[in-house]
Image (cartoon, rainbow, N blue to C red):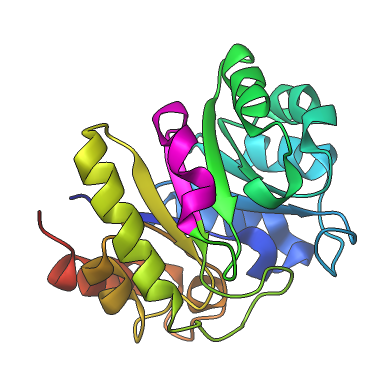
Amino acid sequence: MTVHIAPSILAADFTKLGEEVRAVSENGADSIHIDVMDGHFVPNLTFGAPIISAVRRATTLPLDVHLMIEQPERYLEQFVQAGADMLTVHVETCPHLHRTLQAIHDLGVRAGVALNPHTPFELIREILPDVERVLVMTVNPGFGGQRLIPRTLNKVAQIRTAIAALGQPIELGVDGGVDCSTIGELAHSGADVFVAGSAIFGAAEGVAAAIAALRAAAARDRHTV
């Protein structure tokens, strides 16, 4: 199982966003994670398509756009045109989830599904074959810098087992509270994509050392089938 590190620009310094994105791109990041929040589904407002376009100009890495918004199907094409390579939607906001995932694929990008800490895995079991990534929220979504909710580790392990039984190359990501003290147990539970914000952009040792430390800690404890 590979280790995929996805810095979240939610923790970046927005007075120098391009520099921040280029720094992680040149120092070991595998993709850039962009949290789009609408102030309704989650209690915060963040980025729209113009920010995604700006990040696209600053890096050639894949852009994983995490839509923490109501009615995401209304904006899929807009985010793809801005430069998204993957769109991740929440099961909690998609009453017609299969249709939304089809629409994402029809736009020529990868599709992911996210679920909040309280949401049981069973709500996405039926659509596992239709996604390239499952993203487990390991904190309540909306703000960076939160502590990981330990009970979410069981959900990560449960989803890893289901993915293995399905036999498809589906990525399993975690988002929230990811740092060098937690990434090992997340990897051991079965995660292979790690979204990290303040652990990278706020690291005293710099982004290169922070990404390397996260990768090493995850690789040391990663899940084996």
| Residue 5 in the image, given as x and y percentages of width and height | 39, 57
Q: In the image, is residue 133 part of the stretch drawn in magenta?
A: yes
Q: Quadrant of residue 104?
A: top right
Residue 68 position within the rendered picture, expressed as x and y whole percent measured from the top left? 73, 53
94 above or below 5? Answer: above
Q: Position of residue 76 (x, y in %)?
A: 75, 28
Query: Does the rendering let one see residue 89?
Result: yes
Q: Residue at x 68, y 64 (%)?
A: 10
Q: Is residue 158 magenta?
A: no
- Foreground pick, 224 / 84: 224
The number of numbered discs placed on residues in the rendered structure image is 0
Which is the main secondary structure of the residues drawn in magenta?
A: helix
Left or right side of 7 for 189: left
Q: Which residues are magenta?
A: 121-135
Instruction: Work out whether residue 12 can be spotted.
Output: no
Residue 93 higher or lower than 188, as above or below: above
